[in-house]
Amino acid sequence: MRPGPWLVLLLAGLLFWTPPTFPEAPPSPSLRALLPYPKAVRERLVALHLRNKASLRLLLGEGAARAYDRLLRLELSNQQAGKRSAFAEPQAALAAAERWVEAIGQARRGQRVNLQGLPIAPHHVLPHAREIRAAAGALRIPKGTLAAIVDNEQYGGDKALGLSRGVREAVDALAQDLAALQGQAPFSRTLGLAQMSWEDALRQEERLWRFGAWDPARPFPRTEAEARAALEDPYLNLLFTASRLRGYFNAIFGLSPEDARPLEDPWLHYLGPAWHNYPLRAQNLETWEDSFHGFFKGLLYEVVLEGHWHLEGQTLIPLRVYGPGAETPSSAYPPCLLP
């Protein structure tokens, strides 16, 4: 018996109102499938990865362990697919991760932190620890993420025996003079600790007011010359950078521009340095030196910036601070009281 027209219409209506379904994403390859080595070597590397992951879980919690696992699988997948990756082969990536986890463990236990062989520049970060904590706190993002960006930018500036830094600083000074005299400069777009562009700085006003992060007694910069002058102030450079990051994080997590909840996911330690350094690569989930090492720098600085440290060569030495205010949390520093 053929169905009547009413039944056909009913079925068509049900199909029309049923929400569409999408196929689930294929499962990521197993770790072993990403390790093109003989069985004995492969099992040793799997054990190393699981040991790193377990250590981070004990040191920093489940979120950090999951983020580490995600980063390593991403790095190994990129190597296998021929995409941009931080290392040429898996063994080097896992060895670097092990070295970072070792340093994070030493910091977490309040021991001397051996930084030998790690691409890190704490001598540029630690003098600005207070400003980093305040700027990150004002935009409610992890302080380690902001510190990792500063480290990446300043570590890069230290390369080539200081040549790149010297050239950049000379160009910045010339550009500042031109901007003051002519209103604009044809080069040198980024400045300061986090290498923030003056154009992006001018776009942060609405968000900074929304978060209550801008000192109302201070005029907001309106011109290139004013933006360049503001970005020479370490705290303002970090504040503009944190605001730009917050806008990116809200967008990528599907939050409204007005959403001001604290963001604490350790995966931000990959997303922040990656996007700040090279947005197109970050969008393509590539891994390279600044994004791979930036993730571990974020985890390390999240611990280090909770305390007080002295840098001696390639070793961070914990300091005990006594007296009034020694245990004052970073949130106690209102942005408007900073220089």
Image (spheres, rainbow, N blue to C red):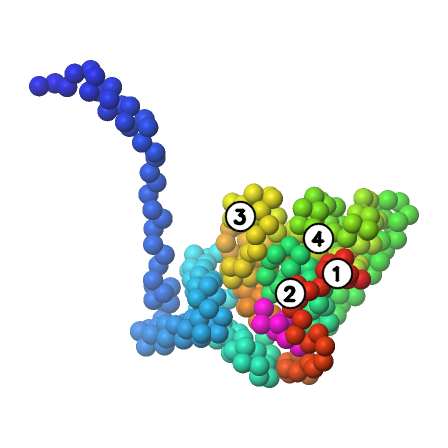
Q: Closer to us: mark 1 or mark 4?
A: 4
Residue identified by numbered label 4:
213
Q: Is residue 305 magenta?
A: yes
Q: Are the residues at dot 1 and dot 3 in contact (C-beta closer than 8 Å)?
A: no
Q: Quadrant of residue 74?
A: bottom left
- The amino acid on which the numbered mark 1 sits, given as a three-letter code, is Tyr
- Local secondary structure at mark 1: helix
Q: Whole-Å distance between the Cαs marked 3 and 4?
A: 22 Å
Mark sitting earlier along the chain (3/2): 2
Q: Earlier in the sequence, mark 1 or mark 2?
A: 2
Front of the two marks 4 and 2: 4
Residue type (three-letter) at the residue carrying disc 4: Ala
Residue 210: x and y, percent?
67, 46
Residue occupying image coordinates x 59% and y 54%: 275
Q: Tell me which amino acid carries mark 3.
A: Ile
Residue 323 image point, x, y percent:
72, 80
Please state, as top left, top right, bottom left or bottom right, where the C terminus lies in the image: bottom right
Badge 1 is on which residue?
235
